[in-house]
Amino acid sequence: MVTRFLWQGMTRNLRLFVLLVLAVGILVPLSNLLLPADSAFRMPSWAVQLVGKYLCYASLALAVDLVWGFCGILTLGHAAFFALGGYCMGMYLMRQIGTRGVYGNPLLPDFMVFLNYKELPWFWHGFDSFWFAAPMIVLVPSVLALALGWFAFRSRVTGVYLSIITQAMTFALLLAFFRNDMGLGGNNGMTDFKDILGYSVQSDTTRAVLCFASALALAIFLVISAAIVGSRFGKALTAVRDAESRMRFLGYRVERYKLFVFVLSAAMAGIAGALYVPQVGIINPSEFSPGNSIEAVLWVAVGGRGTLIGPVIGAFIVNFGKTWLTGALPEVWLFALGALFIVVTLLLPKGVVGLWNQFMNRSRERRARAAA
């Protein structure tokens, strides 16, 4: 029954796309581990790590699209959920360092020793176990989203006002996490990770597994999102997006629909952030930057809002361009990002996927006319 529910919302194209995501998650790491160093088809270790990062960004973009594209909630704060999931993973990784830190303290991370902490803060207890950290990765972002959404949606805050509230939330967290007395590393954050589940985070095998885990998480998120969007609940959700007042008039509890999808997307973003941290080797307050949330919205807009494939494609396109431009012409990137936003808004309102669908529809029409 569960399998049928998950499968029924997927179109043929989406099923093929999920298989493509899984193929990338399998073939990219295997090419690094199995092929000889002089092979033209071998992916270097840095490229495997980069693909893993892009897959995490794609999961974040999908989470944003779920609330913006299908529910009409323009969120400018999803970087906060991404960063909270990352911090939960970072706390677990810091507890795994033990006596291998610079100061050799078996209990306190190095930054706490440097800041003269006498004991481990209460909220760090339990993070020495992965089986405690794993549910926290989902729970912490979800609880924040539940609290924010409960008050905002019950108060019927919508539109630009809700966008400002979500942006204010992530900026407030940015300022809070910069403080050294928060016990989370201050402006330097957490780094110098050693192990995850007993395996070195620096080894090629671990990076390969993390890349595959990122692809698997994205594939699962695509399946779950498709099942929700394709169900009767999803139809009501898009109706809330298009005509919220009419849905209220018909007796629907609109705030419940919004709250469910908002919390689900926050959990997805938290998992993406947790997979991101061991691959990049650091987590700091800059991840809360409102600019990161705005950039995630741009990924969705470039790929195609209201589609499931579009955000993934948009995340890869924009981040590949960012990687290339910041290496070749670093001073140009911000101007290119602004220009991209203007071009998408004016010329590609439905994104890359919308442009492709338009091209395919016209091709079918021409073939139909030719056959007639």
Image (tube, grey):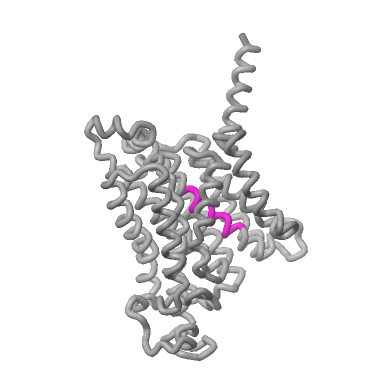
User: Quadrant location of residue 126?
Assistant: bottom left
Horizontal and vertical percent position of residue 187: 51, 74
Q: Which residue lies furthest to the top in this view?
A: 372
Q: Is residue 363 left or right of residue 102?
A: right
Q: Magenta span has 57?
A: yes
Residue found at x 30% / y 57%: 147
Which quarter of the rendered picture does the N terminus lie within? top left
Residue found at x 37% / y 41%: 228
The reply to whether residue 33 is in sight is yes
User: Quadrant location of residue 231?
Assistant: top left
Q: Residue furthest left?
A: 251
Q: Main secondary structure of the magenta part?
A: helix
Q: In this view, does 40 lie above or below 195?
A: above
* Relative depth, front residue between 174 and 44: 174
Horizontal and vertical percent position of residue 182: 40, 76
Q: Is residue 38 left or right of residue 271?
A: right
Task: Specify start and end residues of the magenta stretch as a single range.
Answer: 51-63
Horizontal and vertical percent position of residue 78: 45, 54
Horizontal and vertical percent position of residue 302: 58, 42
Which quarter of the rendered picture does the C terminus lie within? top right
Q: Magenta span has 8?
A: no
Residue found at x 40% / y 51%: 265
The reply to whether residue 231 is in sight is no
